[in-house]
Image (cartoon, rainbow, N blue to C red):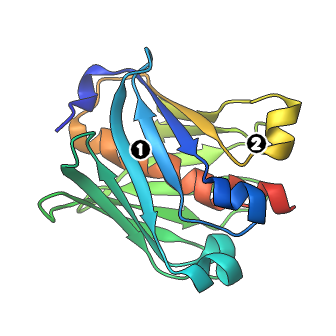
Amino acid sequence: MADLTGYNTLVVRQVVERLEVFTGLETENRYEVLSPDGASLLYAYEESGFLGRQLLRNHRPLKLHVVEPGGSHVLTASRGFFFFLSHMHVHGADGRAIGSVHRQFTFLKRRFRLEGPATQIAGVEGPLFKPNTFMITRDGGEIARIAKQWGGILREGFSKADTFNVEFSTPHDQDFSLLVLAMALVIDLEFFENKGRR
């Protein structure tokens, strides 16, 4: 398995299907996880139903699979249908629970909590006036950050492809790296998924 602990920065880039660009039909999302120098580390792909994607949009039930370039499975993240507050469970290739991502109710902010198998390990907050930035904190200090890259007016207006930088500011283990990677995918699915239709 790719060792993510040696990277302070990961780049998560969405891969857009041509069918979606030309027809407007929602297709299953695909992502590439890169090192800062552009080397492919992992790939992620969505598994969901056609009707759920078209009718339920970003509230749909789905599974995300993360694999190595050679096809070896790294993790599976799954969530059910939700009205307001989502929660996604993350499991390793061996089926072991890595943790979960839970959206929390707040006014004017976007807030989540990251939980390990037994307890909360970090909070995640997206400030109102920094809509593309999510800070991951523990005990009041920032330990990681997920930031959507601005692609320019034309790309943002006409393309659905998003790119996120995941930055770790403290040493991290493999499970935490994978949980934060799942968090980056959740952020894209919940806040940037249908931007082309708004």
Crowding at label 1, few (<14), some or many (≥20) Cα neighbours within 10 Å? some
Query: For residue 190, what is the image quadrant?
Result: bottom right
Query: Distance of mark 1 from mark 2, alpha carbons?
Result: 19 Å
Crowding at label 2, few (<14), some or many (≥20) Cα neighbours within 10 Å? few
User: Does residue 73 appear left or right of residue 187 in this picture?
Assistant: left
Residue beneath the point at 47% across and 80% down: 80
Q: Quadrant of the C terminus?
A: bottom right
User: Does residue 1 appear left or right of residue 131 in this picture?
Assistant: left
Q: Which mark is residue 131?
A: 2
Where residue 40 sits: x, y (%)? 36, 29
**Given the image, on which type of amino acid does mark 2 rest?**
Pro
Residue beneath the point at 68% across and 78% down: 54
Q: Is residue 141 above or below residue 110?
A: above
Residue topped by disc 1: 181
Q: Nearer the viewer, residue 143 or 140?
A: 143
Q: Secondary structure at mark 2?
A: loop
**Given the image, on which type of amino acid does mark 1 rest?**
Leu
User: Does residue 43 appear left or right of residue 130 in this picture?
Assistant: left
